[in-house]
Image (spheres, helix red, strand yellow):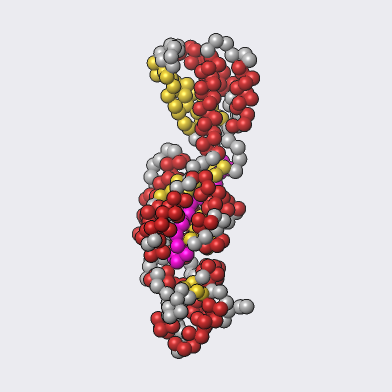
Amino acid sequence: MELTERKKKILRAVVESYIQTAEPVGSKALAGLAGLNVSSATIRNELADLTEQGYLEQPHTSAGRIPSPRGYRLYVNELMEEQRLSLEETRQINEALHLKMKELDNVINQAGRMVSQLTNYPAFALAEGSRRLAIKRFDLILVDSASFIAVVMTDSSVVKNKLFRLPADLSEPQLQLLTTLLNTAFVGKTLDQLTPELMRVAEHAAGNSYGLISLVVSFAMEVLDSLENSPVYTAGASHILDHPEYQDLGKAQKLMSYLSEDRSLAQALALPALDGDDTRILIGPENVADELKDTSVVLASYDIGDGMKGVIGVVGPTRMDYAKVAAKLSYVADGLSKLFGQPELPPGTPEKEE
């Protein structure tokens, strides 16, 4: 049943008051809010109706009301106003995004830490590839007669290197020959193609060259595997303790432990956001994982380029300032997309706060 405008105003006032105070909201507190020109008795009746319809909950008989997951969902979908960031907030985000980092994982990790600081909630960030990556180039650099550095570049322009120490001497001509063999046989190969190609090369390789080729190709496989199964970077898990809902240390510890579980967190939080939505809010029972049924998750996706997307988000109590959190995450995600795609960041010229 469609709510009346008065009920919507009361629901919005309850949600926003509870977000600010973490205390159940009563009719007396609402009487002077949200432009309501009605008596406390009328507000009590409306609160009772909203509770019966499932939009509010009453923790105790004599207590005020708090929003239910259904109430938060209606608030997010229809009632909350779009937030504009302050000039200081946009300056802080832009400065952090302008950090000169060479590695994709460092940028993502730093973005997660920044979001946690901005929102005071635990944050997570990751990148997910929508296509299989392949090797673009190998370079081998001689350090001395018993060691060399292998440099692997992927077709997504990610570069990784590793130092190898050897039990026998290796000359510069031998290393150049290995480089030629690697770039002839293994460039353009994806992760699942490298092993069959390595087996084919084994039939023709002479002397100890196969052992060296195997070392470098195994490293290349590690690189591709790590990029296609990106880690989830989490930050600020201890921020959960700042919120009244998690004063129970057992409850807090359970959530903090879950946030440290890398792949399960990616599957439960990040992957649902990669369906085309720029920003997504999951409230309480809408979350897949049981560990998140009493929390809310706000996610924003960004483009990395070369067929890859990223997700950044926060986890917190359902008593969350959704409008402000969504605005910050959306701005960060937009900035990351522009950072990876072009040198210019979005202009930090939102309207000043009143």
Task: Specify whether 289 is left or right of 240.
Answer: right
Q: Is residue 49 visible?
A: yes
Q: How far across and how far down the image is residue 172, in percent?
A: 45, 13
Task: Specify whether 335 is left or right of 242.
Answer: right
Q: Does 205 appear above or below 334?
A: above
Q: How far across and how far down the image is residue 261, in percent?
A: 48, 46
Q: Residue at x 53, y 14 (%)?
A: 209
Q: How far across and how far down the image is residue 108, in percent?
A: 45, 45
Considering the whole magenta stretch, tell me its main secondary structure.
strand
Q: Would you say residue 319 sits in the magenta stretch?
A: yes
Q: Quadrant of residue 195?
A: top right
Q: Does 323 appear above or below 114?
A: below
Report the front residue among 265 and 201.
Answer: 265
Give the quarter of the figure containing the C terminus. bottom left
Q: How far across and how far down the image is residue 62, in percent?
A: 43, 80
Q: Would you say residue 320 sits in the magenta stretch?
A: yes
Q: Residue at x 44, y 16 (%)?
A: 166
Give the quarter of the figure containing the N terminus. bottom right
Q: Which residues are magenta?
A: 306-321
